[in-house]
Amino acid sequence: MISKNSPTADTHCHLTAKVYDSDRNEVIQRALDSGIRWMVIPGMDLASSRQAVELAQEYTNIYAAVGIHPHNADGWTSSHSLELTELANSEHVVAIGEIGLDYYRNYSTRENQMLAFRSQLDLATQNNLPVIIHNRDATKDVMAELEFWISGISETLKTKAGVLHAFSADLETAERAIQTGFYIGIAGPISYQSATDLQEIAAKLPITRIITETDSPFLTPHPNRGKRNEPSNVNTVVEHLSIIIKKDYDSTAEITSKNATTLFGWKNGKN
């Protein structure tokens, strides 16, 4: 049973998306009323990264990540690095992201995706910040880059290097990522009847390496699949996860929230 006495974290919600323009404040309030204590808004481009920081400045419970999504990598220039560096200096920024590789959509060339990815991994190193990783049909290259990157970061960051968000790869990749210093992000698909592979993987992972997310407005959990997602639905993710890993809701919420706190540090001390 969902309990407001067990605060939860939505570690990945795109509240800068246009679909929230008419009711963004109401969506945020619903999340707070549902016991969501921490929300992380990742950037997709420079504009959304700026807006994420602005929302984090406005709301006590919101934190920002800044980055260029692989879909937008064709526009990458050195000036992006400069502006992201400036944004990353904000006390409200807890990660570099959403960054990575997407060989499914291929909205940007693979060459430009790799350039943006490597440049932003360097940015994370310089700012001693974890990374939020997007991976779709690019597991081999993503893991190769992350395993190389991890060798050059600080010892403190090596144990909390980042998160493979909305995880959809196989168990071997999850175990490699955890060994590399990453957390595994579990989102709405954990509730889908068809997602037996993901459910089996989640059951085999150490709970101390799982964090929860919605990826709002996408990946709405069952039974509201097909509708716009929002951060309050992370409680449903926690509920399904708790059933799969055979823990009670409160314990699952407490542990995954603690994991998120360890990873992101909530460095501005708001909560």
Image (cartoon, helix red, strand yellow):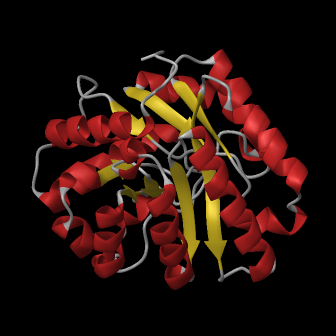
Q: Position of residue 97 (x, y in %)?
A: 62, 50
Specify whether residue 165 is in view: no
Taking the spot 17% from the left edge, 69% from the top edge, the residue there is 204
224 relative to 181 in the view: left or right: right
123 up-or-down from 173: above or below: above
Res 118 quadrant in image: bottom right
Quick check: 258 above or below 141?
Answer: above
Q: Position of residue 116 (x, y in %)?
A: 75, 64
- As drawn, is 39 to the left or to the right of 117? left
Residue shown at the point (78%, 80%) measured from the top left: 111
Q: Is residue 189 left or right of residue 122?
A: left
Residue in the foreground of this view, choosing between 107 and 73? 73
Q: Residue at x 71, y 73 (%)?
A: 114
- Counting the numbered discs, the total is 0
Q: Quadrant of the C terminus?
A: top left
* Residue 189 visible somewhere in the drawing: yes
Q: Quadrant of residue 53?
A: top right
* Image quadrant in which the N terminus is located: top left
The spot of residue 171 in percent (x, y) is 29, 78
Identify the residue shown where x is 36% and y is 67%: 177
- The picture places residue 52, in percent across and down from the top left corner, at 69, 34
